[in-house]
Image (cartoon, rainbow, N blue to C red):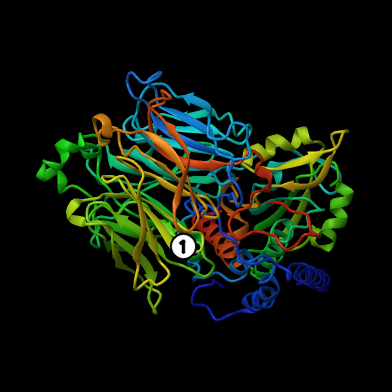
Amino acid sequence: MSFRGARPGRFARRLLVAGGLLACLAPASAQSGAVPGYLPNPPGTYALQDIMQAGDGRVLDSQGRTRRLAEFTRGRVTLLSFIYSSCADPAGCPYAYTVFHLVRSALEEDPAARRKVRLVSLSFDPHRDTPETLRLYGGPDANREAPVRWDYLTTRSTAELLPILSAYGQDASVEKDAAGRPRGPFAHVLKVFLIDRRGRVREIYTTAYLLPPVVVNDIRTLLLEEGREGH
Amino acid sequence: MPKTHRSHSLRLFAALAAAACVAAPARADETSCSPYTPLIQGQEDLVYVWTLGVKGVGDGSDKLVTIDVNPASRTYGKVVHKLSIGGRGEIHHIGLSDDRRYLWGGALDSNRIYVFDIGTDPAKPKLVRTIKDFVQKSGGYVGPHSFIALPGRMLVTPLSNSRDHGGETGIVVYNNQGDFVASHPIPKDGGGDGYGYDAGVNPAKNVFLTTSFTGWNNYMMDLGKLVKDGEAMKRFGNTSVMWDLKTFKPIKVFQTPGAPLEVRWSLAKGDNWALTTSALTSKMWMYKQDAKGEWQVKEVATIGDPAKIPLPVDISIARDGKSLWVSTFMDGTVRLFDLADHGKVREVYQKQVGSQVNMVSQSFDGKRVYVTTSLLGNWDKKGKDDEQFLKIYDWDGKELTQKVHIDFYKEKLGRAHHMKFQVRDLRQLKPLDTAADGLPLLAHSR
């Protein structure tokens, strides 16, 4: 299913329901985030730009095991965002979380996308977002057997996080207490990264223009591209 | 969706909706920035002026000049930092990155692109990257002009090409790390002339608009000589192009004769129209979708007396889309146009601010208007008419009142060209329309 000229399907209907809720999230961004003001281009009719290599670094999975981030950004089409579990800005992490849900709902029923797409949420906040916290935060979303897997990752320390943020060009700043621990929210421009199975960043979305139908069509475009390349 | 997922999602939606339905009215901000860039919704602290070096003036080098513009500051109205980049390359425009932590500046003759860190210490910009292979990487485009932030990328609009140094050119994309990503030619079919100048992005409609100027042969020629060269004067752009922002494919070419220059989209909520002005014909053009959704262009106003060629060179749109400042270089005048009725766009105020004026920029609230003077190194006026300054005015809705005047020659700086605002603390800034204002109980993140 694409979002141009298609009969509104199950996902579109869900969007309409979600859109009603999202419409009052933030003045205009959420409105445009729920339902675009244009018809997205059909999947496979365009090529996404090859923007940059996806960043790598040491991370902790939700079981507390040390892994390489590259393990989570290769082999499948990946949608990655930086989040922190205490983020309460409706135009920030929770909005990305909602969009991830909508995207997953659209794709997990599609045989062409099942087990070819992955979602990754990587925390800004290694001090408060321990693997255990993220296990609770992810809850049933983190089901590793899901057709569209959703991994929640954190890092051992700020020192291990910063090179990853830098590699993705993700800004973030936070006030710290006397002991150097983060205090209050992380100021950041929400970005979501679409990464192909080779680990190349092919699209970047920011808050105001994080449109679920567009994201889904971009993912399908990458899947079609990879199909043509014989993967 | 498994039941557990669905119930979790519904709880999430309900919680978000309940929290967010106290949302604030729509906000807008500095009006020429990319819609992806966090905006200064209050008092700007600093203005960066991209300044052309002049032989015999100071160190003679092109430089980025930083000026304190916060009236509450002890150094208000003073140059607080200057950073020479070495040599003179016909520097022209600057543009903010998508996180406002970097400033990109281009040089139309040397074809270099300079990237400054303005996030670590905004009052002391630091040159962190110089891109020297723009022509080679872009496939032969010359004269990097405008810099418009896209998520993780910078859209660059060159003016010319290395083949004949004429006006045929393209658009170029770099990533934020300074690596070349892609380039695309400005269309020559469908009525296009292949010329380029500025670009304006409207993600809500998945489009961007490009305009057109002239090639290296003309913009590096002495203006007095150029206007006497009939053949050269034919080589100006007469078109503008609407593009698909996702695919980077042209949607439609418009005939907008006489070098349509700066592009501005209205920032008002629900507005999806753009403006440009053509320098040689002194016309204002508006782009809108018709009832069928097709983009159309219409001439909506005349600027000054076209017979006198006032040369409208820059525009600054109010955040509510109701008015537009236009600067006309030749008569050194800034003019305010009332845009409230698109069928009756008219000039309602004008003031001569100098012997020549190029850029005009307004603050988020429209209460402060900034002007600078240099158009191009070889096009600026000569002798006593070659005034070079930054002036800051207060605007009360009726009159411009000068507050700051920095003479760029007296300060041994050079020719004052493009401006961008900055604050000392970036943490409070938000991109357009993502404000969570009205949610005081919720923490913020940009």
Q: Chain of mark 1?
A: B
Please tell me which residue lies in front, B146 or A108: B146
SS at circle 1: loop
Horizontal side of residue A156 vs B95, given as left or right: right
Q: Residues within 10 Å of mark 1 (few under 14, many from 20)?
A: many
Is residue A133 something one can see in this rendering? yes
Quarter containing the N terminus of chain A: bottom right
Q: Position of residue B87 (x, y in %)?
A: 37, 22
Is residue B246 something one can see in this rendering? no
Q: Is residue A80 above or below residue B202?
A: above
For disc 1, the marked residue is B266
Q: Position of residue A213 (x, y in %)?
A: 58, 68
| Image quadrant in which you'd find residue A87 | bottom right
Q: Position of residue A202 (x, y in %)?
A: 54, 50
Residue at (47% x, 51% y) in the render: B32
Q: Position of residue B403 (x, y in %)?
A: 49, 41
Residue at (43% x, 25% y) in the render: B411
Query: In the image, what residue type sits under mark 1?
Result: Ser
Please tell me which residue lies in front, B16 or B416: B416
